[in-house]
Amino acid sequence: MISIFNYRKNYFRKQFRRQLIEADQNRVVSHKEIATVGILTTELFFNTIELKEEVEKFLKLRNAKIYCYRPYKKSNTISFKHFSEKDYNWKGKIIQNNFQSFIDQPFDLLIGYFDKNNIYLENAVLQSKASFKVGIAKVNQMLYDIEIKSNPSNIEEFLKELKRYLLILNKMKN
């Protein structure tokens, strides 16, 4: 017998796969220069790396926005920088308003800074209205316009590669 939780999770995964295929077929890459940046990451990277500050410094931008996935615990305090599986309904729709606002922002660049498959982070990247998406290689190549092979604990290496590609694509000035 399938529990309600497993049914919900399976339905969520099926919806995600269908939306991913549809998004991949309809992908249009923007040629606009990068001015706004959004970052989606895990609690591990959020707590160990000054990700937002490093991105702003390397790309010479200000006001990057960051949102972090952390597994749900009753003891977690409410935060406008974190989301969990509880912020999605059983159909995979975001129900937390602040997180939905982040996803709806038309960033020029969205960085998916996570190195392991996570259906909630991947779904957030997929639903994002960002015009250009970059992430770490081997997570889910259908999500991103560019994947960068890098050791995720070395943010500097990732950002050097990212900047190199953005310069080649004329998405930023040197």
Image (cartoon, grey):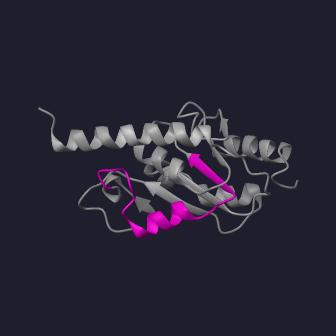
Q: Residue at x 75, y 56 (%)?
A: 59
Residue 158 belongs to magenta span:
no
| In this rendering, position of residue 97 left or right of residue 161 | left
Does the image show residue 137?
Answer: yes
Can you tell which quarter of the image residue 35 is in? bottom right
Residue 90 belongs to magenta span:
yes
The image position of residue 88, as x and y in percent, is: 35, 55
Can you tell which quarter of the image residue 136 is in? top right
| In this rendering, position of residue 23 left or right of residue 10 | right
Does the image show residue 152?
Answer: no
The answer to which of 64 and 20 lies nearer the viewer is 20
The image position of residue 121, as x and y in percent, is: 46, 47
Q: Residue at x 73, y 44 (%)?
A: 162
Look at the picture and state if 147 lies above or below 109. above
The image position of residue 140, as x and y in percent, is: 53, 34
Q: Residue at x 29, y 51 (%)?
A: 90
Q: How many marks?
A: 0
* Residue situated furthest right in the rendering: 174
Can you tell which quarter of the image residue 39 is in? bottom right
Q: Magenta span covers which residues?
A: 89-112
Q: Residue at x 17, y 44 (%)?
A: 4
The answer to which of 160 and 66 lies nearer the viewer is 66
| In this rendering, position of residue 29 left or right of residue 48 | right
Quadrant where the image shows the N terminus = top left
